[in-house]
């Protein structure tokens, strides 16, 4: 069973063989977790969101329609993330900000790597949309074509936006050093 | 080539996405231009940092939670199967046939008696009912074109009461939803149409309306309706709203709340 590709496994899941989701979880939970972690910089939230993503993948298995599995999963991840963000916005923002900052510091002291720290700060200065594109394309190595599928855009538009975002990131990064 | 042009292509140059020829040109340019070669080094540094970024591991309870969730979902799936099998086991074909025969006999007796007595009467009733229905439709359609907004509103509310409205009623409602001068009439028409969402024509009209609608109040109403009738074809229009700068934030928020429910 482990030799089957993602799409074949997901079709089995959608037909009711839920155990196959275990293999897909093994293949993808680190990717999704790291994607969300880069976006939120918060381990607790990232853990919750990743779990929610796989829960939804099982719940809505019938809505999977033979497309690329990873694109489908990332689409769910983006929805869960923006859902969470929506809820976050409605809560008391000041308390949330403090929590975020404390988490940031913890991560940074562990890393002890100045360039990396600078880059994270530069990344946080970008809009969520730009940040997401860099995380997907550069940190996660997702091709322009697939990002276009996930975000409902075209390859050309995605490529232009990613390049623009990288140049913005570079500018913020240079300002910091 | 000019520096600006070179800088635009540096990322593709690093990723080796360019033709040999262009790549060569950039290389020769870089040798003579410190600005551009600086920019190249900065990009390379950033990509280097990104590429050596360690992969973070979640806590181990993520795996445990996943397994528990999977077991729960499997149990739910199994439950629904078990119930249906058991039912089949308990009731044999013989008793099903007996019950069916009894019901058939009772029904036959009932209809025989009823038909004998009231065949002509019920025919008349049916004709009358149909006439009343037709009259109501005609009245609604004429009222819906009235000059007074409150009369039009009343007509829209009448239309809502039909159980199976004809195409001319639906068309009139769609027309009101799209073009009426008065926003309250348009909202009421959209609301009425939501009740007839079984009809493919209504669904298409609602999707088209969202695509072209400019009024934020109507946009909100349409998004709510489309989400509640689970119309997946409206997703592109909703995403378009999200992208447009002109869309007010509260409409975007509504889309953000609604979209996940369609997936």
Image (cartoon, coloured by chain):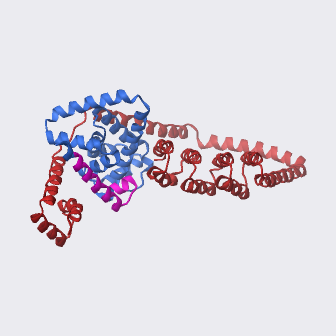
Chain colours: A blue, B red
- Regarding residue A8, the answer to whether it shows in the image is no
Q: Identify whether A99 is placed above or below A170.
A: above
Q: Which quadrant would the C terminus of chain A be assigned to in this image?
A: top left
Q: Is residue A156 magenta?
A: yes
Left or right relative to A106: residue A68: right
Q: Is residue B223 above or below residue B83?
A: below
Decide if residue B257 is on the left or right side of residue B49: right
Is B68 left or right of B56, judged from the image as shown?
Answer: right
Q: Depth check: B197 or A151 in front?
A: A151
Residue B78 in the image: state x and y as whole percent. 44, 38
Query: Which residue occupies 15% across, 57% down?
Result: B40
Q: Main secondary structure of the magenta part?
A: helix
For residue A157: magenta? yes
Image quadrant in which you'd find residue A77? top left
Taking the spot 75% from the left edge, 49% from the top edge, the residue there is B152
In the displayed structure image, the side of residue A171 where residue B116 appears, left or right: right
Which span is picked out in magenta?
A147-172
Q: Position of residue A94 (x, y in %)?
A: 36, 28
Q: Position of residue B204 (x, y in %)?
A: 59, 57
Camera-side residue: A102 or A154? A102
Residue B56 visible at all: yes
Q: Quadrant of residue B221?
A: top right
Q: Position of residue A44 (x, y in %)?
A: 30, 32
Outermost residue toward the left in this view:
B31
């Amino acid at each position: 069973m482990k030799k089957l590709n993602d799409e074949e496994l997901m079709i089995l899941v959608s037909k009711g063989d839920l155990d196959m989701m275990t293999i897909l979880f093994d293949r993808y939970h680190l990717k999704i977790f790291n994607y969300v972690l880069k976006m939120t910089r918060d381990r607790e939230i990232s853990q919750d969101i990743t779990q929610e993503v796989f829960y939804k993948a099982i719940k809505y298995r019938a809505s999977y329609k033979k497309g690329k599995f990873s694109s489908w999963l990332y689409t769910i991840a983006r929805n869960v993330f923006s859902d969470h963000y929506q809820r976050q916005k409605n809560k008391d923002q000041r308390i949330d900000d403090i929590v975020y900052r404390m988490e940031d510091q913890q991560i940074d002291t562990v890393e002890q790597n100045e360039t990396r720290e600078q880059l994270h700060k530069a990344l946080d200065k970008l809009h969520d949309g730009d940040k997401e594109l860099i995380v997907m394309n550069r940190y996660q190595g997702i091709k322009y074509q697939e990002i276009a599928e996930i975000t409902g855009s075209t390859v050309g538009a995605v490529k232009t936006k990613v390049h623009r975002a990288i140049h913005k990131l570079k500018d913020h990064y240079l300002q910091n050093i | 080539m000019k520096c600006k042009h070179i800088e635009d292509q540096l990322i593709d140059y690093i990723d080796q996405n360019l033709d040999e020829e262009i790549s060569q040109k950039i290389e020769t340019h870089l040798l003579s231009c410190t600005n551009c070669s600086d920019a190249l080094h900065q990009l390379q540094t950033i990509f280097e940092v990104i590429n050596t970024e360690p992969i973070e591991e979640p806590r181990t309870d993520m795996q445990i939670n996943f397994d528990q969730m999977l077991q729960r979902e499997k149990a739910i799936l199994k439950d629904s199967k078990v119930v249906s099998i058991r039912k089949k086991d308990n009731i044999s074909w013989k008793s099903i046939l007996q019950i069916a025969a009894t019901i058939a006999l009772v029904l036959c007796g009932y209809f025989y008696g009823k038909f004998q007595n009231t065949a002509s009467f019920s025919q008349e009733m049916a004709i009358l009912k149909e006439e009343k229905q037709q009259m109501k439709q005609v009245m609604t359609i004429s009222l819906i074109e009235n000059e007074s907004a409150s009369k039009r509103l009343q007509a829209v509310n009448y239309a809502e009461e039909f159980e199976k409205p004809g195409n001319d009623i639906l068309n009139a409602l769609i027309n009101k939803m799209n073009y009426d001068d008065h926003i309250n009439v348009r909202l009421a028409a959209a609301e009425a149409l939501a009740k007839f969402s079984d009809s493919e024509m209504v669904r298409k009209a609602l999707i088209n309306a969202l695509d072209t609608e400019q009024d934020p109040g109507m946009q909100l109403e349409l998004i709510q309706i489309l989400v509640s009738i689970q119309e997946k074809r409206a997703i592109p229009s909703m995403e378009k709203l999200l992208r447009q700068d002109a869309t007010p934030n509260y409409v975007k928020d509504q889309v953000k709340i609604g979209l996940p429910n369609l997936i």
